[in-house]
């Protein structure tokens, strides 16, 4: 285990986190929020001290870096980022409980959008900005940013880290160099975020609100800046947010293919077609089911499209209290919570790519039962899928189900209803945000015990990092020396 290289990597991650806190500190200074200023200054000093110690201790690290180190680095980095990133909330006393502050920042970094706050609008501007910016930073991945803008080198360093952090069953190269791939992804991400901000400002949304809303949309996070989420905003702003939530749920490789004019490859992409097919069918079914609840057809379709886009991309914004919708519509939304967005997007959930592979694998097994001597292969976009990818997909599904019910059992100790507990697990593990009943779109997670909040925080991290980097941290073999 290359501990020195991992330590140096953690120092770099902490340094980047500190740099990104500076705009929030500047906002707090400008607004005269003294407690928020204190929170950011103290946190920056802590980050500087920790990073300096790690840099000094980990000098002269060997260059060898393997898959095990990549998984450990990713899991440990996200834990450290969250443990330190929540300090401004706690030190400023805007969130007095450290456990609550930790839950809130984990929800931000993992782009979940679940909150313990009963009055979001009471937060100071600097704290509100940092809370929302954590979405944007966690959406594409903090490690992807580091790989894009640093010159860290080592045997397998870039590939192992990007594979461990990126969402989806497989990570491939857009171009020969992985660092260039990371740069392309982040440039696309930044440009789309800027366009989103501009369109929100055109709709008369104040600049700070536009920034925070766009950060949540781009990262598909959804920590709302208003107590009623997006309810009070105009239909134009809601529609803009709907479109961009869905766009950020698309595999970013598709945008690169569009840039190099590979139109046919995008059109033929099976995951993309299934993704948009699920969205369109869900909107149609929900709109028909809730038509009597709204005065006009336009409003019905707008709310149906917004909530479908918000849930399948795991963003979590809301324009209406969908917990009041009929059971059929809520069932569709809960199914979308599990499905999630495309692999290689900023969205969470099981991923449409995995759903596609599981469906094709099931079809192959049925065909082999009917004709045992015939050799069947699984194809995706015309190419044969490696059996290792299929095995990993099945292993992921098994781990997904086991963790889902284990977390559900633990938080059930708090005594809430089955609907509340199950939707709470679904919406945290799949990085969505709002659930049903007591954790619905107009409610929050403040009533849960500290134990449940910590377990749900762990579930958010496991969901964002595709389970395995977190499980590896708790495996005895990970830490055994050969």
Image (spheres, rainbow, N blue to C red):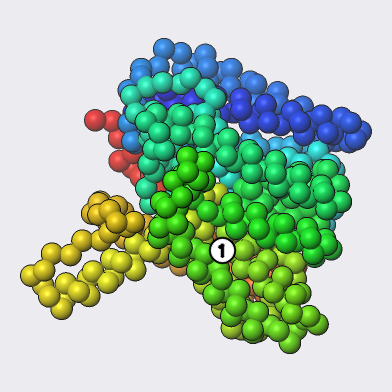
Q: Looking at the picture, how far across and down is residue 127, in whole percent?
A: 78, 41
Q: Quadrant of residue 6?
A: top left
Query: Is disc 1 placed on a helix, strand or loop?
Result: helix
Q: Residue furthest left?
A: 373
Q: Nearer the viewer, residue 440 or 261?
A: 261
Name the image quarter holding residue 365.
bottom left
- What residue is disc 1 on? 312
Q: Is residue 413 in view?
A: no
Q: Quarter of the image for the N terminus: give it.
A: top left
Name the one closer to the observer, 178 or 114. Answer: 178
The spot of residue 422 in percent (x, y) is 55, 71
Report the side of 63 relative to 79 (left or right): left
Characterize the local packing of mark 1: few (<14), some (14-19) or many (20 or more) Cα atoms within 10 angstroms.
Answer: many
153 relative to 355, above or below: above
- Residue that protrudes farthest toward the bottom in the picture: 292
Q: Residue at x 41, y 21 (%)?
A: 153
Q: From the viewer's perspective, is 134 left or right of 459?
A: right
In the drawing, does residue 245 fall left or right of residue 343?
A: right
Outermost right residue: 32
* Residue beneath the point at 59% across and 17% down: 52
Q: To which quarter of the image does residue 282 belong? A: bottom right
Q: Is residue 461 above or below residue 88?
A: below
Image coords of residue 193 (percent x, y): 67, 43
Quadrant in which the C terminus appears = top left
């Amino acid at each position: 285990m290359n501990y020195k290289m991992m330590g140096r990597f953690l120092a770099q991650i902490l340094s980047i986190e500190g740099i990104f806190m500076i705009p929030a500190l500047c906002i707090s200074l400008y607004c005269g929020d003294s407690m928020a200023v204190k929170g950011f200054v103290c946190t920056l000093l802590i980050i500087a001290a920790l990073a300096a110690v790690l840099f000094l201790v980990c000098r002269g690290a060997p260059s060898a870096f393997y898959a095990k180190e990549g998984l450990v680095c990713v899991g440990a980095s996200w834990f450290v980022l969250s443990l330190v990133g929540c300090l401004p909330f706690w030190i400023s006393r805007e969130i007095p409980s450290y456990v609550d502050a930790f839950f809130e920042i984990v929800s931000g970094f993992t782009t979940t959008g679940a909150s313990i706050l009963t009055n979001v609008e009471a937060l100071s501007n600097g704290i509100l900005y940092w809370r929302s910016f954590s979405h944007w930073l966690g959406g594409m991945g903090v490690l992807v940013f580091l790989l894009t803008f640093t010159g860290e080198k080592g045997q397998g360093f870039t590939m192992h880290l990007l594979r461990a952090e990126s969402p989806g069953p497989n990570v491939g190269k857009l171009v020969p160099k992985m660092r260039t791939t990371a740069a392309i992804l982040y440039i696309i991400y930044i440009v789309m975020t800027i366009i989103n901000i501009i369109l929100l400002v055109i709709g008369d949304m104040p600049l700070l609100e536009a920034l925070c809303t766009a950060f949540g949309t781009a990262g598909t996070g959804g920590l709302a800046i208003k107590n009623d989420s997006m309810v009070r905003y105009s239909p134009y702003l809601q529609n803009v947010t709907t479109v961009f939530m869905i766009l950020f749920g698309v595999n970013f490789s598709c945008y690169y293919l569009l840039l190099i004019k590979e139109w046919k490859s995008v059109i033929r992409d099976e995951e993309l077609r299934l993704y948009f097919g699920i969205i369109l069918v869900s909107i149609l079914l929900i709109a028909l089911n809730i038509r009597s609840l709204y005065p006009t057809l336009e409003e019905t379709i707008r709310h149906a499209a917004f909530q479908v886009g918000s849930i399948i991309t795991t963003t979590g914004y809301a324009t209406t209290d969908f917990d009041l919708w009929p059971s059929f519509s809520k069932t569709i939304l809960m199914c979308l919570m599990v499905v999630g967005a495309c692999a290689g997007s900023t969205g969470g959930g099981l991923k449409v790519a995995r759903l596609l592979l599981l469906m094709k694998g099931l079809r192959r097994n049925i065909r082999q039962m009917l004709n045992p001597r015939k050799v069947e292969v699984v194809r995706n976009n015309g190419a044969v899928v490696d059996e290792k990818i299929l095995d990993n997909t099945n292993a992921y599904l098994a781990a997904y189900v086991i963790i889902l019910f284990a977390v559900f059992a633990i938080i059930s100790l708090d005594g809430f209803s089955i609907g509340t507990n199950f939707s709470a697990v679904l919406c945290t593990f799949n990085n969505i945000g709002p659930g049903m009943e007591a954790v619905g779109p107009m409610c929050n997670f403040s009533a849960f015990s500290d134990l449940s909040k910590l377990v749900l925080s762990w579930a958010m991290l496991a969901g964002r990092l595709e389970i395995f980097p977190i499980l590896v941290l708790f495996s005895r073999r990970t830490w055994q020396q050969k």
